[in-house]
Amino acid sequence: MFTQIMAARRGYTANAVRFDGSADYLLRGAGLTGASDSKVGVLSFWFQFQGGDGSEMKILHGAATTIQIIKNPANKIRLILQNSGFAFGWDASTATAYTADGNWHHFLASWDVGSSAGYIYVDDSDDLSEATNTDQDVEWTQSDWGIGSTTGAGDKLNAEIADLYLNTATSLNLSTTSNRRKFIDGDGKPVDLGATGAEPTGSQPLIFLSGATATWHTNLGSGGGFTENGALTDAADSPSD
């Protein structure tokens, strides 16, 4: 039965959307419903940059700027996770630079700053460059959130994105292959995270943006929907192709 379930999950086709780098971005307009500061988290998404090489682009941005997931000017994906006093819980990035190379990539990170555990895997390979890992409560209780830009509509994202998942209630040891298989299969393709994103851990994450382009911004996770600015469009292809 388990083999049949996993085969069905691997047969999943992820829908990807296009952020055009000029008009398209999402705003929550409030805090994430049910969010609380924590030391742990899991972040997963598929990406294909379409431009912006050498410039900073925001993937996820909190209004207080203590939380930022960015593609930095060195073309590395960086996680800035701080407490309310701007002390770092985790400052980490990919070791590899990623540009508009025409290829789909999978980003997967998990952290537990209370135990100094942190992982970044890209395309199922360890890609962590860690600057800071200290025991701090990361400030997930922000007044607003932006996806594809700052909350002030700056640093817009020029990329195609699929299955954006953020869980701030748990962490996973990503050096264990079976934990990575919750998000990426052995062939490097997406797996079905469930109708509400609960499949990987058994609980609904705060953010799970997935499904049809027209409703992608509504958030299948528990944190509440986003307002679409501009108009997301279908990506040219899917990471499942």
Image (tube, grey):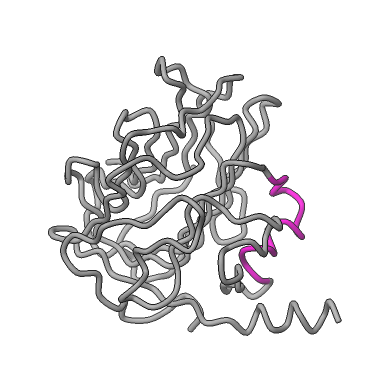
Q: Position of residue 215 (x, y in %)?
A: 35, 72
Q: Quadrant of residue 201?
A: bottom right
Residue 155 is left or right of residue 182, and the answer is left
Q: Position of residue 181 (x, y in %)?
A: 69, 64
Dominant secondary-structure state across the stretch colored magenta: loop
Eyeballing the image, is 186 above or below 24? below
Viewer-side residue, 4 vs 29: 29
Q: Residue at x 39, y 42 (%)?
A: 69
Residue 147 is left or right of residue 129, and the answer is left
Give the quadrant of the N terminus. bottom right
Viewer-side residue, 43 vs 122: 43
Q: Total label count?
A: 0
Q: Which residues lie in the magenta part?
A: 172-185
Q: Quadrant of residue 168?
A: top right
Q: Position of residue 52 (x, y in %)?
A: 22, 54
Q: Position of residue 30 (x, y in %)?
A: 32, 42
Residue at the outermost left position: 22
Q: Residue at x 67, y 42 (%)?
A: 171
Q: Residue at x 40, y 70 (%)?
A: 103
Q: Residue at x 52, y 36 (%)?
A: 129
Residue 190 is left or right of residue 158, and the answer is right
Eyeballing the image, is 82 above or below 59? above
Q: Is residue 174 magenta?
A: yes
Q: Quadrant of residue 158?
A: bottom left
Q: Is residue 80 magenta?
A: no
